[in-house]
Image: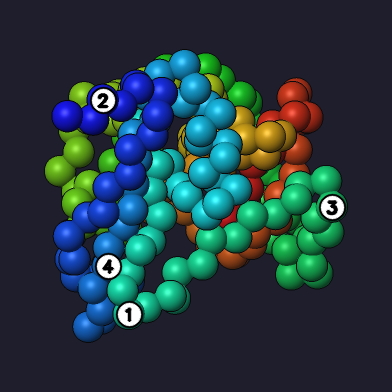
Amino acid sequence: MTQHSRDTPQFYLTAPSPCPYLPGQEERKVFTHLVGERAGELNNLLTHGGFRRSQSIAYRPACERCRACVSVRVIADEFRPTRNMRRVLDRNADLTGEMRVAVPTSEQYSVFRAYLDARHYDGGMADMTVLDYAMMVEDSHVQTRLIEYRRRDRAAVRRSCTRISGKSRGPCPWRATRPSRGESGATRPYPACPSWRFTIG
């Protein structure tokens, strides 16, 4: 029997399942587990290869008859926002961000719960409990931080980010009842720690 080191990534392919984005299509993913001392290094390498991370799993689409999903990475220091993106940034000028360690709170979960109920009510995450959320935040071998955004009235929104060669990525659940703030891929440095980047979207 072949023995594999814990630090040697093993890749797996999921079985076909209905695509959650395009009717009539099936999706498959290739994935690996991010564990061990080299998890951060592996995550950095895979991210530049189009992978995304969910907790301790890195994955990317591997669909047999479709290539519609495209992973896009932006070089933050070279990014220049479009006029529409600048309008979105102006519309969100009432938000302030604070970077925090990855420790879950009940307030974060209430925002996350509202996001799931509004955007993923029939998806695989719909039944996530507060304990599931806590595990999602804390269960990681990769250096992770949370950025909490707040309006001037102190209502909270949240984003998670992972340090990847000076850039970051992560889900951004806003309150489902928020007024429209526009759609944008504008990226700016977090002012307290310029080597981290986050995306307003």
Q: Is residue 115 visible?
A: no
Q: Amino acid at mark 4?
A: Glu
Q: Amino acid at mark 2?
A: Gln
Q: Element under label 2?
A: loop
Mark 4 and mark 2 residues within 8 Å of each other at the beta carbon? no
Q: Element under label 4?
A: strand
Q: Which is more foreground, mark 3 or mark 1?
A: 1
Vertical order, 184 against 115 (above or below): below
- Precedes in sequence: disc 4 or disc 3: 4
- Precedes in sequence: disc 3 or disc 1: 1
Q: Look at 19% across and 70% down and name the residue there.
A: 18
Q: Look at 55% across and 51% down and name the residue there.
A: 49
Q: Element under label 1?
A: loop
**In the rendered image, which residue does mark 1 sit on?**
65
- The Cα atoms of the two marked residues, 4 and 1, are separated by 9 Å
**In the rendered image, which residue does mark 3 sit on?**
78
Q: Amino acid at mark 1?
A: Arg
Q: Quadrant of the N terminus?
A: top left
Q: Which is more foreground, mark 4 or mark 1?
A: 1
Disc assigned to residue 27: 4
**In the rendered image, which residue does mark 2 sit on?**
3
